[in-house]
Image: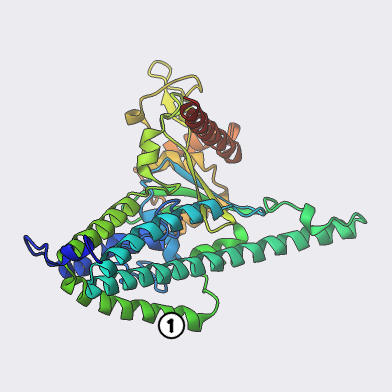
Amino acid sequence: MGYPWISLLQWQPFQIDALGLVTLLGSEEVNVAVGRLVASRWLEYMPLLGAFLYNLSSGITSTDIAPWFTRWMAVQGFEITRSIVYWEVVNEPNDWLRYKIASATISFCSIGLLMIMTALSGDWYGFTNALVVAISVIVRAFIVSANRRAIDHRVLEYVNTCQKKHSAIDAQQGEPVPLADIGATEVEYAKTLVILPDSKAVTMFLPQGLIVSVFTRKPEPFNDTLYHLLRWLGWAAFAVHIVTIGMAQLVAQIYSVILLVGSTVLLCYGVGCDVSRLHRRWSKPPQDIGYSPYTCWIGSHLKATIFQWPTSVEFHKDEKTGVLRKREESFTMPQCERSERRQDLYAWLNLSDAEVESLTRWDLLPHLRRGHESWSAQWGEKRDLIRKDPVDVEALKNDAVLIIEKRRTKFQACDVEKQGH
């Protein structure tokens, strides 16, 4: 009755020890890939190597930055000084339902095949291994979802506060406005400079009211008891997993290793994610900017747009006249010649006197000494030039969004054309 599955029990031309693979490979990479809370359209519910070894409740390297934010920044591939991240809160939640259904279907078919194969062949160690792999996926999905919902809750709290504030102001003026008519974009943004461990300086614009509750402190998931109970369930399943996979039949071990390694590699490369480096490489950037802007959602209400300072703000000193000026917008400069100086970045930021004082206190600006004032003089000249024509960062963000939308529309048109043929 079990033919041909029962023949799998006798097929063992060689032996492997999958136990070492499961316990040693991929834990750090999975910790970062999962902990950044970015959703993958296709791999959200796939089993992963080291899937029980991550801890979303503890910080990474800094007590001043939330763990998810640290992990998110670590995999972005920012430029040394030119990258900008513009975070927005969005009232209308992002619709992930169709992607969750697709990802769940892929996971169900992949793990379900392993369960059916091992059950029909009578490999009960292999069947138990498949069962605890499914449990690991459920535990990880709950933990990640709980952290995303915690961020969504903080974001919506801030949106409601802003809405009530605007509604109260309008009511005082005799023109009450319903909360639903107030956009979530009517928030105050903070100009922020993030210095990464590799000395990259990233410009970020963060909603002022979310800096502490979302980006600095870790938003705590609801139902703390269930959260920790499921984490312990994950560890218990891991203990069963490392035993049963080593005692399963060869076919089940090979299938499990291929499934775990394949899913882990694809997720760590960001396949199906908005921040996928492969997607950005395949997306041909416009010739006038030389890079591919992209967006990224954390949860359903927090969206980041990642782009760069344009070539038009690069500084150029005329060799004949010695006059410093900004590059013309029509001027195309190779990517390798783009500025990577902190001095230029500080000028682009159009810092106020108070912001300059803060940078000085944090030792991010050179100290002035007699005979060593050339850096300050150059920066002052560039700063004055930018002040005459300051950079509109919100306009740059809107231009980046248009580029992304055009690229997305182009891909959709290509898919429709292929389906038509």
What amino acid type should be assigned to the residue bearing mark 1? Answer: Leu
Nearer-the-camera pick, 388 or 200: 200
Nearer-the-camera pick, 29 or 138: 138
Quadrant into which the N terminus falls? bottom left
**Could you say which quadrant of the image residue 389 lies in?**
top right
**Residue placed at 11% from the left, 66% from the top?**
10
**Residue placed at 47% from the left, 70% from the top?**
142
Q: Percent position (x, y) of residue 94?
A: 59, 52
Nearer-the-camera pick, 146 or 316: 146
Q: Percent position (x, y) of residue 54?
A: 34, 69
Determine whether 103 is above or below 242 in the image: above
The reply to whether residue 269 is in sight is: yes
Asked if residue 139 lies left or right of residue 302, the reply is left
Determine whether 358 is above or below 401 in the image: below
**Could you say which quadrant of the image residue 289 lies in?**
top left
Asked if residue 284 lies left or right of residue 100, the reply is left
How would you rate the neighbour count of disc 1 (Cα within 10 Å): few for under 14, some for 14-19, many for 20 or more? few
Residue lying furthest right in this view? Answer: 174
List the residue tagged with mark 1: 229
Residue lying furthest front in this view? Answer: 1
Q: Percent position (x, y) of residue 11?
A: 11, 62
Nearer-the-camera pick, 258 or 202: 258
The reply to whether residue 373 is in sight is: no
Asked if residue 418 lies left or right of residue 210, the reply is left
**Residue placed at 42% from the left, 66% from the top?**
67
Asked if residue 329 lies left or right of residue 138, the reply is right
Q: Percent position (x, y) of residue 141?
A: 44, 66
Determine whether 198 is above or below 82 in the image: below
**Residue placed at 59% from the left, 32% from the top?**
388
- Mark 1, secondary structure of its residue: helix
The type of colouring in the image is: rainbow
